[in-house]
Amino acid sequence: MEFTVRLFIVIIIVILCGYSGYAFGNFYRRRKKFLDMLVLFCKFAKNEINFSHSYISNIIEKFVKNNQASSVEFASFLLDFKELLAANNTEFDKLANSSNVQILTSEEIDNLIQFLNALGKSDVFTQLTTIDNFLETFKVYRDDAEAEHKKWTSLYFKLGILLGLAIGVIFI
């Protein structure tokens, strides 16, 4: 009876350590998803500006409506930006302190703020050129995030499982 209780406790420890490893890897999943959505938003905004000549607030509203389930963090970030636009507030640095972008590096946040600040400020041709330039930059960020995701997410999970097994061996 004592062995089965110990075995049950070891299984619980391995599961908890594996979940902890999964949780540590979640940072890289969220970062990759945010940057995926940013690239998608750039493409969407480019098409909307090019063909519909829509206002930025309408573009954001349409994008969030269609893609909110994909990344809640990115959708809420865009909605925060839209609120600043509606209030004619040009202090976009407040967005840099948002909890939604804490998964990004300071360089990525700066480029994101510059990108959003540039939208709707010039003619269509200049906006399309600006979006293309930022799109290339964001694709590089996304590719880096994807490489980190592949590398670190599975590593943290495996380390969690191994730690649980090591604690289990010591416990038995």
Image: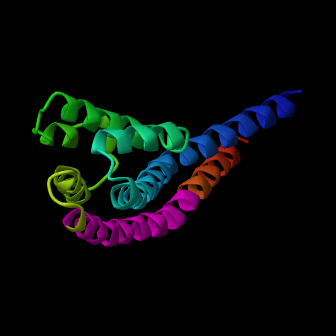
Q: In the rendered view, how is the structure colored?
A: rainbow
In the image, taking residue 7 as reference, residue 25 lies left or right, namely: left
In the image, taking residue 94 as reference, residue 144 lies left or right, namely: right
| Residue nearest the viewer, comparing 118 with 155 | 118
Residue 37 falls within the magenta-colored stretch = no
Q: How many marks?
A: 0
In the rendered image, which quarter contains the N terminus?
top right
In the rendered image of this protein, does residue 13 appear above or below residue 154? Answer: above
Q: Main secondary structure of the magenta part?
A: helix
Which residue is outermost to the right? 1
Q: Position of residue 32 (x, y in %)?
A: 46, 57
Q: Position of residue 49 (x, y in %)?
A: 33, 56
In the image, taking residue 98 as reference, residue 4 lies left or right, namely: right
| Residue nearest the viewer, comparing 37 with 43 | 43
In the figure, residue 106 lies in which quadrant? bottom left
Q: Residue at x 40, y 69 (%)?
A: 144
Q: Residue at x 23, y 68 (%)?
A: 125
Which residue is outermost to the front? 52
Q: Position of residue 52 (x, y in %)?
A: 38, 53
| Residue nearest the viewer, comparing 34 with 3 | 34
In the rendered image of this protein, does residue 14 appear above or below residue 87? Answer: below
Q: Residue at x 28, y 64 (%)?
A: 131
Magenta residues (range): 126-155
Q: Position of residue 160 (x, y in %)?
A: 58, 50
In the rendered image, which quarter contains the C terminus?
top right
In the figure, residue 105 lies in which quadrant? bottom left
Residue 149 falls within the magenta-colored stretch = yes
